[in-house]
Amino acid sequence: MAIDPYVLDWLNLILRWGHMIAGIAWIGTSFYFVALDFSLRPREGLPPGVYGEAWEVHGGGFYQVQKYVSAPPSLPDHLTWFKWEAYLTWVTGFLLLVVQYYVNAESFLINPEVMVLTPWQAIAISLGTIVAGWIIYDQLCRRLAINHSLILLLCVLVMIVAAAYGFTHVYSGRGAFIHMGVFIGTLMAANVFLVIIPNQRKIVASLIVGETPDPRYGAEGKQRSLHNTYLTLPVLVMMVSNHYAFLTEHPQSWLLICLIVVGGAALRHYLVRTEVGDDQAEIAWTIPVIASALALAMIIAMPRGPVLYQGEVSDAEAVEIAATHCAACHAANPKDPATKAAPKGIMLENADDLRRHKTQVMVQAVAGRSMPLGNKTGMKPDDRAKLGAWLAKQP
């Protein structure tokens, strides 16, 4: 059933706002507790079972925080649980995926030049890979557990690389990047929902009946929490990637995703260790890793320049190409059913319009090939080359 584009825009805005609010809350608490955990210091005189404590100052007040190795002998009357931030981030994000990419799959998710799919096939692959990704990751964590953390890290990285390669060879550039964000974000949210919170509940249940909680539950929760914090910065790049065609439309975009994951994780490590006061000499190795990942990504994504048509292209030919492939959306009265008004107010209905928006058209439709969305009009390389050649000669 078709949904009015105006209604979809409002749903998109509301869900995007909610996603940002929940995400900020989740990332904020995650960053804080990871920094707190690394800031704990043992000292004489701590209560039995306390691993360490941290003194903090914020907002004009002083705070003394202590962490137990497993759990305290008894629970206080009030215990604050941090979980809804993660749950709401995933729920709003998934609903946004539905509104933006599932409802408009032919525009945002599918690109026939990459793989010919029906909307239902594209959606089924999306749902299947999201579930499969969690199952594989969870099994890796359970089998390698805490004693093989380096091997686990490498296996998770290989899994992410494989997912990136797969998505970029199935979906449009935008669809592939956003699915990497959803793929990793699902691992993070499921860590909270299926491991961290259940383990905490098992610890609480043991305390209630007077048993000593199994320390393995706390160790598993901490491991998953660390995974989450190191994946946070790469996910943020995936979520804003749709604004940057040089990332999403690059032929080796899967490699760019890998560099984002490695560089983002290294940056997170640097920030964590700096925040807790580590000597800069001990974490200096992260700087060349971050710089190398960024530099290599910039080199790979460097524009090579579009292949332009060598013959003459008339104004009429250029306008005809735009009318066929651009004006369905970029017009005073768009004919595309998924578009209510010309995106960003850009109209491409005549030669003057094309000249006025020459730079955007060259970047998006000629060099970047991110337009038309999903290439659902079947714009051929020759059409792009001709349009680019005409634009290149315009003042």
Image (spheres, helix red, strand yellow):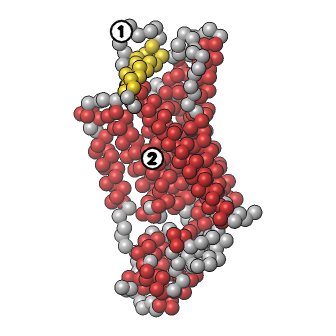
* Relative depth, front residue between 22 and 318: 22
> Which residue type carries mark 2?
Pro
**Picture disc at residue 333:** none
Spatial distance from mark 2 to mark 1, Cα to Cα?
Answer: 40 Å
Return the x and y of residue 339 as percentages of the image width and height.
62, 70
Return the x and y of residue 234 as percentages of the image width and height.
45, 47
Above or below: residue 205 compared with residue 280: above
Q: Residue furthest front?
A: 60
Q: Secondary structure at mark 2?
A: helix
Binning the other alpha carbons within 10 Å of mark 1 as few (below 14), some (14 to 19) or many (20 upward) gives: few
Binning the other alpha carbons within 10 Å of mark 2 as few (below 14), some (14 to 19) or many (20 upward) gives: many
**Picture disc at residue 234:** 2
> Which residue type carries mark 1?
Glu
The answer to whether residue 133 is seen in the rendering is: no
Q: Residue at x 62, y 23 (%)?
A: 201
* Relative depth, front residue between 73 and 390: 73
